[in-house]
Image (cartoon, rainbow, N blue to C red):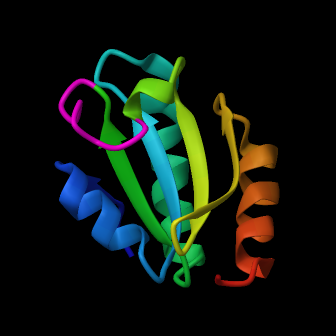
């Protein structure tokens, strides 16, 4: 599975409903974002039960909660619109740990 590029708030909200989603907030100027992206692509192939989406904070200013992102890369793990966990930084161990939390979470 690939990482979906989200371009607007309606698309963002539709994907969150009823799904387990890993949201990657990034920007083209962010070196750590570029460095972690190939790893995230690998994970999207491994964890096919999770939808991986990318939100470019420069291009998607209308996306809900975008103003709460203070630093990038930022990762948000969501199950059926409910946030399970989130963090900032390209920490591979924390990404895997958070994916496992998301996989074990129950839908609302």
* Quadrant assignment, res 25: top left
| Magenta stretch, main secondary structure class | loop
**What residue sits 42% from the left and 30% below the top?**
34
Query: In the picture, which quadrant includes the C terminus?
Result: bottom right
Q: Quarter-wise, where is residue 55 in the image?
A: top left
**Residue 37 horizontal side relative to residue 103, left or right:** left
**88 or 1: nearer the eye?**
88
> Was residue 102 drawn as part of the magenta stretch in this picture?
no
Q: Give coordinates of residue 96: x percent, y percent.
A: 75, 57
User: Seen in the image, is 54 located left or right of residue 51?
Assistant: left
In the drawing, does residue 47 fall left or right of residue 72? right
Front one among 2 and 13 = 13
What residue lies at 62% left-to-right and 57% top-to-bottom?
77
99 sits left or right of 14 in the view: right
Find residue 92 and report its horizontal and vertical position in percent. 72, 44
Image quarter hosting the N terminus: bottom left
Residue 11 position within the rendered picture, expressed as x and y whole percent measured from the top left: 22, 62
Q: 58 above or below 51?
A: above
Tell me residue 42's x, y (percent). 52, 62
* Residue at image point 49% right, 79% down: 19
Instruction: Farthest residue to the front: give it.
Output: 108
Q: Which residues are magenta?
A: 58-65
| Marker count (numbered) | 0
């Amino acid at each position: 599975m690939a990482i979906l590029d989200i371009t607007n708030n309606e698309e963002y909200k539709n994907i969150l409903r009823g799904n387990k989603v890993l949201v990657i907030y990034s920007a083209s100027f962010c070196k750590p974002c570029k460095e972690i992206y190939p790893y995230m692509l690998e994970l999207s192939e491994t964890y096919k039960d999770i939808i991986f989406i990318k939100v470019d904070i420069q291009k998607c200013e209308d996306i809900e909660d975008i103003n709460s992102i203070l630093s990038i890369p930022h990762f948000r793990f969501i199950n059926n619109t409910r946030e399970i966990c989130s963090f900032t930084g390209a920490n591979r161990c924390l990404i895997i740990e958070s994916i496992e939390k998301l996989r074990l979470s129950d839908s609302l």
